Amino acid sequence: MGEIYFVRHVESDIRVHDEFSRPLTEKGLQDRALVTNYLKDKNIQYIYSSPYVRAVDTVKELSEMLAIDVACIEGFRERSISSWVEDFNTFSQRQWDDFNYRLSSGECLREVQLRNVTALMELVQLHPEGNCVIGSHGTALSTIINHFNPHFGFEDFSKIKGLMPWIVKITFIYQVAIKIESIDVFKNNEITTIGLSKPILTNNFK
């Protein structure tokens, strides 16, 4: 059995509009201790991340504690919007209503889901019985959940939009996803089960 812990990054400085280099806020730097404290005893063997600074820095403290290097995987990066969007809520709802909707040089959610789930499946096949941490993002992680549970949509995404950090644990047996759990580190690590539409083999994703 392998357990994947996705970590949606802690609070970052939205005054910095560059997606790659946006740093953590002081609150974010403090809150990442919640991530470290929750994951430090989970027998983590590998740590991966989106290449974006806010995702890497969220799991950096855990990486240093466990003496495990963070390996960045391009496929786990956040959705590319193409330009700064002032009305993010309306834009997000339109994308969730139509997975093929995107701005001229940005990505649609179907594209984001494809590369994120593909990257996930490759890791599960590489470490079928290993426990991994993956530094992630709100939209990217939500599209992964939607892959396993298509009922997870805009309303669910809206509920976690301001939840930073947020941990989602996906349990695999023989490369089959059997359980998804949401962990709220702000509520004494409260665990909520996110239903699966059906067990999904890793090699069935296209």
Image (cartoon, rainbow, N blue to C red):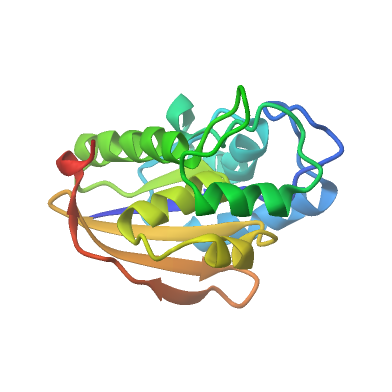
Residue 15 placement (x, y as % from top left): 87, 38
Instruction: Tell me which corner region of the image, top left, top right, bottom left or bottom right, holds residue 193.
Output: bottom left
Q: Nearer the viewer, residue 169 or 158?
A: 158
Residue 61 placement (x, y as % from top left): 61, 44
Q: Residue at x 49, y 56 (%)?
A: 40
Count of marks, rendered view: 0
Q: Nearer the viewer, residue 51 or 98?
A: 98
Quadrant where the image shows the C terminus:
top left
Residue 178 is left or right of residue 156, and the answer is left
Q: Residue at x 81, y 42 (%)?
A: 13
Taking the view exactly as shown, the residue that stands out farthest to the top is 105
**Residue 41 in view here:** no
Considering only vertical position in the picture, is 49 above or below 32?
above
Instruction: Tell me which corner region of the image, top left, top right, bottom left or bottom right, holds residue 145.
Output: bottom left
Taking the view exactly as shown, the residue that stands out farthest to the left is 174
Residue 96 placement (x, y as % from top left): 53, 52
Residue 158 placement (x, y as % from top left): 62, 63
